[in-house]
Amino acid sequence: MAEYAEYRQNNMDNVLNYNYGVELFPGSSHNPVIKKNTREEALIKLKKLLRINGFAFLAENNKEAFIMMFLYARKMNENNALGLIQNYYQFRREHDLWFRRLEPFDPKIQMAIQDGFPSVLSNLDRRSRRVLFMVCSQWNTERYCLLTIYRALLVSLEHLIQDVNTQYNGFVFIVDWTNFTARQTMNISPRLLHVMLQGLQDCFPAKIKAVHFINQPWYIDGLMSVVKPFLKEKTKNKIILHGLNLNTLHEYFPRDILPSELGGEQPPYDSRTWLKSLLGSSLGVDL
């Protein structure tokens, strides 16, 4: 735990100092000059790029907190952050219906979150990342579709990335496929799944550090083989398959932060907990 405390203190120092974006400038061929962007420098540079590229409404209307989410997601690189902002707005235009009434008060979204799509652990992992998990067998395909689960995930992520530490440290996912049936799989369109993953990969201002699959059946492996060719190599490497071996999962996640259904030491997770938190935050009250 001492090692963890030291890591967390160093991590917090980095967040407070905002000195972690890196740019390479031409020096000699053997000694490139490395300059670190501070938060303020990156913000000034990105605002200038936004004005040039048709996003002056972001640069001029006190949208610093919103802009910073994209800078954190791209490690204070203003050019990459601009590209992410462009992708974000293009994705929303192309899929406008997906983003209408994107809030926890939408009845379908409430159904999905109440079933644990997603669940959010109260404890962070050892790298101060938020941990989201989904028990896929809980998907009631007669009540809501895959798109509703995606919308519920977006609502949750948009809420979580309001926290600057989460912007900096990112997320990890645990997806439990135990007892997920082949019949449920028939409700997953590979094409739709591909578009959804593309949205998270290229268009959303969040650092998704890893996705851990446990107890995945063979037909999920088959589904992923269809989707993976469309993913970036970096994204593919973030998908970690554990199969039936929870011991390898616990090499990444200490048992003391996990609920009992994931082989952890915490009580079973109440999937209504996160919905209550979202609704309470939206109303500004405790439920």
Image (cartoon, rainbow, N blue to C red):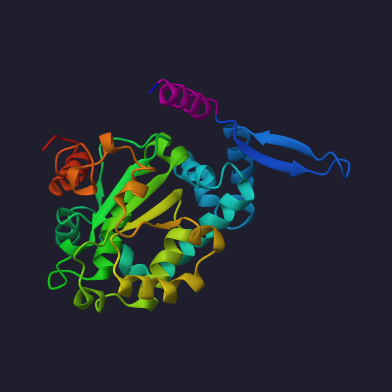
Give the side of residue 177 with respect to residue 127, left or right. Answer: left
For the point 32% across and 63% down, the residue is 99
Can you say which quadrant of the picture contains the C terminus? top left
Q: Nearer the viewer, residue 220 or 133?
A: 220
225 up-or-down from 80: above or below: below
The answer to whether any part of residue 166 appears in the image is yes
For the point 48% across and 39% down, the residue is 64
Q: Position of residue 237 (x, y in %)?
A: 50, 58
Give the side of residue 17 with respect to residue 49, left or right. Answer: left
Can you say which quadrant of the picture contains the N terminus? top left
The prevailing secondary structure element of the residues shown in magenta is: helix
Q: Nearer the viewer, residue 6 or 250?
A: 250
Q: Is residue 146 within the magenta segment?
A: no
Residue positioned most to the left: 287
The answer to whether any part of residue 158 appears in the image is no
Q: Which quadrant of the view contains residue 117?
A: bottom left
Q: Nearer the viewer, residue 90 or 265?
A: 265
9 up-or-down from 115: above or below: above
Q: Which quadrant of the view contains residue 139?
A: bottom left
Q: Which quadrant of the view contains residue 76?
A: top right
Q: Is residue 12 within the magenta segment?
A: yes
Q: Which residues are magenta?
A: 2-17
Q: Position of residue 236 (x, y in %)?
A: 49, 62
114 up-or-down from 32: above or below: below
Q: Position of residue 267 (x, y in %)?
A: 14, 39
For the point 86% across and 42% down, the residue is 30
For the point 15% across and 43% down, the residue is 273
